[in-house]
Image (cartoon, helix red, strand yellow):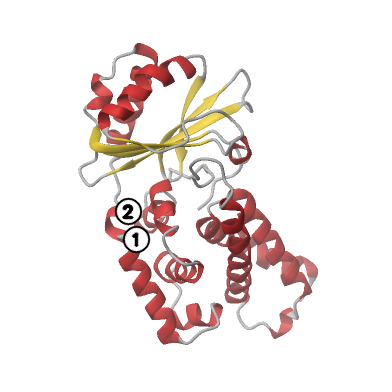
Amino acid sequence: MGGANSTEIFEKTRPRLLGLAYRILGSRADAEDAVQDTFVKWQEADQLAIESPAAWLTTACTRRCLDLLKAAHRKRVDYVGAWLPEPIHTASDDNAEEKLALTSSLTTAFLLMLERLTPKERAAYLLHEIFGQPYEEVAETLDMQEAAARKLVSRAKTNIGVEKSRHQTPRERQDELLSAFHTAIHGGNIAGLSSLLSADVRLTADGGGKVATVLGVLSGKETVLAFIADRLTEYWAHYVWDAAEINGGRGIVLRGETENDIAASVSFGYDGDGNVNDIFIVRNPDKLTHLGDAVVH
């Protein structure tokens, strides 16, 4: 297999590998590393002996992600404050059913659900339920019997409550929320925002110990609204606000004086009634570095 053809095969598979790696790791930077490591291994492999390049690359990438996930969990023990997945831009111009299914598995709420799973449960669930791999291939990728792979997926589906976590809220409702959130910060009027929040709404902020932010999770409508009115109206008033597609939903990017000066990203989780039950704020500068990169699918 020629070098050019070999690279072409890999590049066709790269978007799928990156999407899989990001969902497993919750980090764009780590996902890029996993995909690059897979490319190196692909170049070193006896490609003429590989019957299905796509399956081989998926297996290699998944196994590399599981190795990186172990290291990531060790680092997270010492993480300062709440940990959130690295925010990413996502595409919004294709509303085909299969694209919506993929997008719903990129939400911050869903990625946090995956954190409840063991590494192999997470990989098995994603490979089968999100990327459509047959159980036989999932088992081969994870080096186990097919029955064991089926059990992993079954346990994962039970543990994460799939239907609720992948609920799709209409874009009109999401845009209404962005407008109300902006009004609350800049106009001091929280009535519109209050009507869109669930009674048990949570606000989680990730500063990673690099920037000042609330360390614990704030819970309850009154507590969250008080924090927004008393603190965020002062801290965020001078930032430039950009609406953006973040992790499969309408979100906000807060910028300083320049395009590349990203201070925070804000995304939201919704309940089945379309009310906001989670506000996710990422301020850790290490996690905002890749926010302007190409979208993840």
Q: Position of residue 48 (x, y in %)?
A: 73, 82
Amino acid bearing label 2: Ser
- Image quarter for residue 257? top right
Q: Which residue is mark 2?
A: 165
Q: Residue at x 56, y 41 (%)?
A: 80
Q: Earlier in the sequence, mark 1 or mark 2?
A: 1
Q: Position of residue 60 (x, y in %)?
A: 63, 72
Q: Position of residue 267 (x, y in %)?
A: 42, 37
Q: Residue at x 48, y 77 (%)?
A: 138
Alpha carbon of mark 1 to alpha carbon of mark 2: how far? 8 Å
Q: Count every numbered label the image shows and give the total.
A: 2
- Image quarter for residue 130? bottom left
Tell me if 71 is positioned left or right of 272 in this view: right
Q: Position of residue 137 (x, y in %)?
A: 50, 80
Q: Residue at x 48, y 42 (%)?
A: 82
* Mark 1–mark 2 CB contact (< 8 Å): yes
Tell me if 143 is positioned left or right of 99 in this view: right
